[in-house]
């Protein structure tokens, strides 16, 4: 605890951004916000020298609670900067201090160190801050709370509570042995300034008293922090990944994403697909609706742990959907949303690779089933959803509806629904007392499908307001191979014919799914890849009528591309872009053709990270299309943020007013240190002038 004289002080540090640079708010001493202003400084510019405020605060911190409010900006790329600290600056006590620090990758954290009592707390959350936006240094808003009653530390940043940790040996800022210095913009360690801050402190105000969570969330709100899907929204998901954007013919802009309930883990987990739309050029968005969802596990807003043990725990029994892509049929205006379908407990790593989940009967493919107490797939789903006993080729009393829910004699069957909770280091998956319709994808179903991955889609007839029953696609790779994996983002509809194409991939091969009849039937074309075992997520763009380029994630550290000059029927060998670098595992990208010409030429816009050191350094590249041959000259780039800031999967679309909508994961989704981060799926609106300067 902070000790000033005989008082123990509980500290709350709050940094926030206002739309204007007005003074910090003053809260009356009442039951909801018992806080009183005791110190304030404004317009402080620091150049790694810090500002000592010990004499100003040591005698006025006379409450059991304290609040410090700061708004700041910095474009300094020092690896570590302290924003505020208290310390013992005497010799031999360099590890007795508290600080709030930031790193040059957007991480925000605190240290509480008291070497005399062997206390060394370090709590931090990556991807908490903004570095820059639209080529200008960004203002940030953060809050720290040290709560003596709860023995906890909290951090808020830009309108979100990003961290809360309870400790057994709680220390406030002045409980650290020998604390004698309070500093803005660094830490005084043995008389020397360390972790110096280089930037502007617009306001720093200190209050006696504690502000509530609601106040902290409000005061740290940041106009930069726009999102379409947010933690705890109507989907009840705490985490979102894998964005998709698509501008419909009507001018409506449609977004989709994975709503993830078991942290940010991929399948196996509980994951639904949610959608939202905007009718005002991305300014406002509707509450999310489910395009694809399973009910075997409850939708729960759970804080998934991030410690080194529990962060790796996954929900093991739920069915899931993952990785959506959008396209609109230009004649019927129907919207097709495609995704990967995963049975209970199945993900990419444990899906059977030598089984499609289908059987062939009289030249037709049918989904095969087994009874839960049997090991052989003696059953199949025939026309109208009727389940046949294939040993005698006769219908049973069972069938499935359009959502693959099971019925017996036309009455629905039911199974218990599951919920999850953590019990120390174990995840408990338990029946919650509610019954839901039995589904062949569920672990407790009477009939079970093959434990492999499937590919399917749903259609909206009303521009994304509602979604129809899902439909699984047949096995394009044959009976003895699992389904291909969908490339999330956009499908493509060709300009001079109503051909719809989705890009999918499998081991060593691109598989293009093609429909020439509004999605009623599908065929496929293949293209070889010069590498195996790669997640070759790909996005397509039409350079000119019938000429398509596919840009894809590879295992080479580069973005690959291939070209078709015959409407997607055949494809060239893979070539590589030299101006973008990725780690060996690569990352998804997004690409569109812009409607307006630049200097008389068509242009492409490509969103991608550009770093060998993880999914970082988000950029938008401008490519000039060569009209005389199918090639692109990549000329300009726009940096979404500083190069160390995370940037993973993204989606880009041209808005009806020719602005550019960008929905992206503002963190490194590959890093194990950045698992389970909330509210990192950001939305920005840019102009071509922002990008092409």
Image: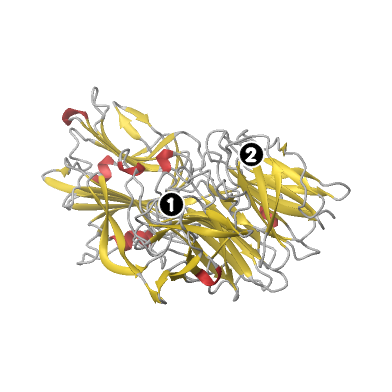
Q: In which quarter of the image is residue 297?
A: bottom left
Q: Indicate the colouring scheme.
A: secondary structure
Name which residue lies at 82% across and 52% down.
566
349, above or below 301, in the image: above
Task: Give the total of numbered labels.
Answer: 2
In the structure shown, which secondary structural element does the residue marked by tag 2 occupy? loop
Name which residue lies at 70% across and 64% down.
658
Residue 228 shows in this picture: no
Name which residue lies at 71% across and 38% down.
577
Q: Which of 434 and 266 is in front in this view?
A: 434
- Left or right of residue 622: residue 421: left
Rendering coords of residue 469 (x, y %): 52, 70
Disc number at residue 553? none
Q: How crowded is mark 1: few (under 14 residues within 10 Å), some or many (20 or more)?
A: few
Rendering coords of residue 603 (x, y %): 76, 53
Rendering coords of residue 205 (x, y %): 33, 53
Q: Which residue lies furthest to the left in this view?
A: 6
In the structure shown, which secondary structural element does the residue marked by tag 1 occupy? loop
Disc 1 versus disc 2: distance between alpha carbons? 31 Å
Q: Residues within 10 Å of mark 2 (few under 14, many from 20)?
A: some
Q: Which of 378 and 123 is in front in this view?
A: 378
Q: Which of 105 and 367 is in front in this view?
A: 367
Residue 458 shows in this picture: yes
Which sits earlier in the primary sequence, circle 1 or circle 2?
1
Q: Would you name the residue on which mark 1 appears?
A: 376
Name which residue lies at 10% across and 44% down.
6
Disc number at residue 508? 2
- Left or right of residue 559: residue 26: left
Rendering coords of residue 376 (x, y %): 43, 52
């Amino acid at each position: 605890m902070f000790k000033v004289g005989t008082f123990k002080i509980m500290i709350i540090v709050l940094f926030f951004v206002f739309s204007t640079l007005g003074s910090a708010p003053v809260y009356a001493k009442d039951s909801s916000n018992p806080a009183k202003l005791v110190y304030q400084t404004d317009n402080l510019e620091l150049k790694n020298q810090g500002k000592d405020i010990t004499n100003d605060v040591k005698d006025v911190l006379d409450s059991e609670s304290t609040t410090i409010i700061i708004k700041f900006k910095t474009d300094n790329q020092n690896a570590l900067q302290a924003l505020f600290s208290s310390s013992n600056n005497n010799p031999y006590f360099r590890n007795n201090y508290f600080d709030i620090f930031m790193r040059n990758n957007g991480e925000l954290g605190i240290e509480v160190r008291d070497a005399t009592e062997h206390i060394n707390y370090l709590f931090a959350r990556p991807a908490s801050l903004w570095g820059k936006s639209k080529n200008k240094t960004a203002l940030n808003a953060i809050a720290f709370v040290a709560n003596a009653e709860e023995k906890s530390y909290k951090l808020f940043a830009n309108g979100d509570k990003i961290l809360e940790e309870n400790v057994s040996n709680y220390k406030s800022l002045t409980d650290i042995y020998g604390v004698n210095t309070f500093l803005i913009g660094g830490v005084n360690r043995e008389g020397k300034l360390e972790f110096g801050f280089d930037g502007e402190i617009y306001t720093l105000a200190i209050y006696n008293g504690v502000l509530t969570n609601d106040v902290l969330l409000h005061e740290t709100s940041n106009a930069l922090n726009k999102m379409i899907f947010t933690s705890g929204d109507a989907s009840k998901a705490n985490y979102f990944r894998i964005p998709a954007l698509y501008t419909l013919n009507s001018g409506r802009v449609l977004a989709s994403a994975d709503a993830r309930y078991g942290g940010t883990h991929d399948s196996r987990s509980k994951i639904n697909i949610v959608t939202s739309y905007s009718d005002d050029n991305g300014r406002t968005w509707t509450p999310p609706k489910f395009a694809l969802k399973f009910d075997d596990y409850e939708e729960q807003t759970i804080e998934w742990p991030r410690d080194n043990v529990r962060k790796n725990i996954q929900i093991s029994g739920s069915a899931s959907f993952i990785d959506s892509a959008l396209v609109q049929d230009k004649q019927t205006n129907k919207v097709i949303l495609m995704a990967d379908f995963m049975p209970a407990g199945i993900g990419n790593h444990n899906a059977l690779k030598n089984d499609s989940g289908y059987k062939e009967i009289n030249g037709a493919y049918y989904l095969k089933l087994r009874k839960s107490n049997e090991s052989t797939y003696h059953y199949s789903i025939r026309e109208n959803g009727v389940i046949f006993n294939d040993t005698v080729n006769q219908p049973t009393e069972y069938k499935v509806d359009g959502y693959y829910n099971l019925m017996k004699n036309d009455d629905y069957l039911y199974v218990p629904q599951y919920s999850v909770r953590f019990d120390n280091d174990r995840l408990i998956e338990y029946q919650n007392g509610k019954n839901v319709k039995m589904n062949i994808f569920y672990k407790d179903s009477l009939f079970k499908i093959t434990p492999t991955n499937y590919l399917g889609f749903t259609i909206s007839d009303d521009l994304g307001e509602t979604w129809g029953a899902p439909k699984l696609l047949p096995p394009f790779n044959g009976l003895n191979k699992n389904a291909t994996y969908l490339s999330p983002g956009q499908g493509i509809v060709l300009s001079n014919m109503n051909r719809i194409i989705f890009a999918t991939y499998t081991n060593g091969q691109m598989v293009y799914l093609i429909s020439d009849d509004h999605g009623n039937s599908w065929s496929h074309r293949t293209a070889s890849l010069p590498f195996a075992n790669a997640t070759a997520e790909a996005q397509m763009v039409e350079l000119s009528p019938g000429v398509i380029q596919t840009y894809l994630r590879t295992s080479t550290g580069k973005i690959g591309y291939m070209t078709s000059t015959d409407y997607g029927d055949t494809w060239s060998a893979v070539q590589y872009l030299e101006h973008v670098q990725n780690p060996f595992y690569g990352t998804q990208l997004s690409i569109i053709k812009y409607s307006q010409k630049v200097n008389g030429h068509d242009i492409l816009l490509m969103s991608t990270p550009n770093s060998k050191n993880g999914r970082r350094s988000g950029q938008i590249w401008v490519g000039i299309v060569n009209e005389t041959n199918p090639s692109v000259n990549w000329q300009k780039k726009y940096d979404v943020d500083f190069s160390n800031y995370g940037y993973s999967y993204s989606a880009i679309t041209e808005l009806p007013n020719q602005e550019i909508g960008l929905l992206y994961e503002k963190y490194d989704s590959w890093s194990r240190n950045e698992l389970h981060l909330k509210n990192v799926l950001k939305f920005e609106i840019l102009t071509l002038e922002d990008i092409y300067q």
